[in-house]
Amino acid sequence: MRRTRFLLTVMLVVLFASAPLISAEQPSESADEAGLDPAALNVRLKPSVQVPSELPLTLGQIAVIEGVRVEQVAQLPLGRAPSAGQQRAVSQRSVWSALEKSGFAPEQFVIEGAALTRVLGIGQLLDEERVRQAVNEAIPQLLPEAVAEVEEIRMPGRFMLPAGEYEVRVLEPRVPIRTGLVRLPLEIELEGGPVRRTGIYARLTVERPVVVAARDLPRGERVKPTDLRLVRSSKSSGEELSDPADAVGRIVRASLRMGQPVRDLALAPSIAVETGQQVVAIYQRGGIELTLDTVARGRGEVGAIVPVVGPDGHGIVRARVTGPGVVVIVGSDELNVDEPAQEPNP
């Protein structure tokens, strides 16, 4: 019995000891299928190459390949090409690893040539004419009331794009566009690729409609339609009024000279209700609307809270001015405020 156990133990030891040797003598399955002889593939790396940027990089782009199945080996992926104008290095070791992972045994290929291949991503510069065209097309949307002329375009320094078609769009800038040098943000959409953003500087001449005084207007005078003219100016800061209707009926805060642009801050708000004026007061609650002819006990512009005489001439209630001679009583469904009545400063 002991002799039988001893013989079985010896046989198992011999079997396990011989297993690696048997495996080492067997050729790999991929080598059998490929039918490659030792050193049947020669790969010679180039010292430097230029390839289309941001596309898959293959072995055939960076090396001269000789031997069997050249076309198949040439398509072996090596990651992605660098961005336009950027570089990356591909070493012999990385090529060796890629070949092994694809099923080639080390004795079936030889790598020669450069130890490192410098890969430069090539693309195209952002075209100035296309940018100028995009700016001209965007101006009417960005400045619907103005007329602008593009005098100069300053391009970003060597802004590279991958090869292929692209579309340029001008985005709305963060600051108002006026005459002078303005930075305009760009969005560049690549065909089948990502969206890039950059910016350019454009020197523009912008003419806007500007309201000016048609005569000298003293402080405290109410503006009439005949007191104003509408002109076009390339020196507008964007703070001037562009519609005479925005000035008519308002009070001049500081004297204006003839031809002087009229700014919003130069005029007091238009008074919609005067003290002692007959007004229509509206009260709304739960779908019921009541109107009351009453008298204002204060003056104010649209949005101001003024006191008005209550129903039957008794007491005082607060109301918000909603238009010339019209107020809504505080407490209505559409009005819920807790503000003191105030007299506007002329």
Image (spheres, rainbow, N blue to C red):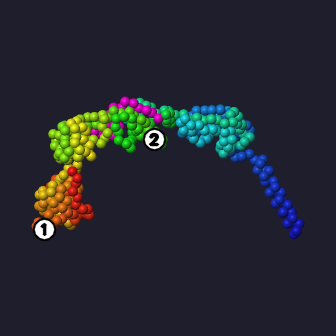
Q: Which amino acid does label 1 sit on?
A: His
Q: Is residue 303 left or right of residue 173?
A: left
> Percent position (x, y) of residue 35?
70, 40
Within 10 Å of disc 2 (Cα), the crowding (few <14, some 14-19, many 20+) is few
Q: Residue at x 33, y 33 (%)?
A: 205
Q: Residue at x 18, y 37 (%)?
A: 215
Q: In this view, does 211 lie to the left or right of 203?
A: left
Q: Closer to the camera: disc 2 or disc 1? A: 1
Res 314 label: 1
Which quadrant is home to the N terminus? Answer: bottom right
**Secondary element type, mark 2:** strand
Q: In this view, does 253 lie to the left or right of 137?
A: left
Using the numbered discs, state the Cα–Cα distance from disc 2 to disc 1 in whole angstroms. 66 Å
**Secondary element type, mark 1:** loop
Quadrant assignment, res 336: bottom left
Quadrant assignment, res 16: bottom right
| First in residue order: circle 2 vs circle 1 | 2
Q: Which residue is drawn at 33% across and 40% down?
A: 142
Res 197 label: 2
Near-viewer residue (32 or 73): 73
> Percent position (x, y) of residue 181?
39, 35
Q: Give the range drawn in magenta.
A: 136-156
Within 10 Å of disc 1 (Cα), the crowding (few <14, some 14-19, many 20+) is few
* Residue 336 lies in the magenta stretch: no
* Residue 141 lies in the magenta stretch: yes
Numbered circles on residues, count: 2
